[in-house]
Amino acid sequence: MQISTPLTDEVVARLRAGDSVLITGTIYVARDAAHKRLVAALEAGQSLPFDVRGQIVYYMGPSPAKPGRPIGSAGPTTSYRMDPYTPPLLKAGLKGMIGKGNRSQAVRDALQRYRAVYFAAVGGAAALIAQSVKASEVVAYPELGAEAVLRLEVADFPAIVINDIYGGDAYEAGKAAFRREAAR
């Protein structure tokens, strides 16, 4: 399924755990240190360095760009490290996150409450994923180096819906299906 950013409630409502998507538009990259600063700004009543409403944040481990490319490898990093910071960002209007691995129950509950989704990018496919990145620029916290907030322009960025607004969990569904097959 093709989707574009910013995400609307209507698009989010159509997405179900297990759906494969190709994302086109703007996504943001932020990891632990940036998340800590973003949530501190929200708690202090300050504006964020980008408008999170309708946006997707990618938990990415970037590598230096090769000549003529906007970014090097662009693989996902483990998502649970951002779990303590995720509900306040969802409350502020964030509609999607991309990473790898399971999310906490608090995050899954917040996805339902604030009508947002969690996508997984395929770990180990960082060079392939990077081909969908058409432009990259630092938009906040440049002093954080590899953990600075980036704005990426992407075309057909491949991802899988893991957690949807209905409580669906593709990881749990996959494990359940495997258990059924193994029991036969």
Image (spheres, helix red, strand yellow):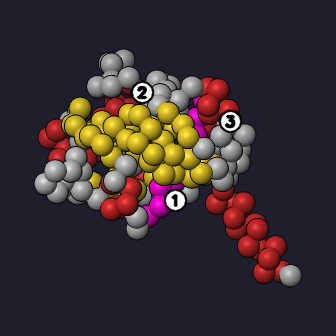
Q: Residue at x 57, y 25 (%)?
A: 8
**As shown in the figure, which amino acid type bears the numbered disc 1?**
Gly
**Label ID, residue 14:** 3
Circles 3 and 2, Cβ within 8 Å, touching? The answer is: no
Return the disc, 3 or 2, that comes first in the chain's sequence. Answer: 3
Spatial CA span between label 2 and label 1: 22 Å
Spatial CA span between label 3 and label 2: 21 Å
Placement of 119 over or under 86, stated as above or below: below
Crowd band around label 3 with a 10 angstrom C-alpha radius: few (<14), some (14–19), many (20+): few
Placement of the N terminus among the 4 image quadrants: top right
Q: Residue at x 33, y 62 (%)?
A: 127
Which label lies toward us, 1 or 3? 3
Spatial CA span between label 1 and label 3: 22 Å
Residue 163 seen from this side? yes
Q: Is residue 118 magenta?
A: yes
Q: Write down the residue under mark 1.
A: 101
**Label ID, residue 179:** none
Which stretch appears magenta? 114-123
Q: Write down the residue under mark 2.
A: 52
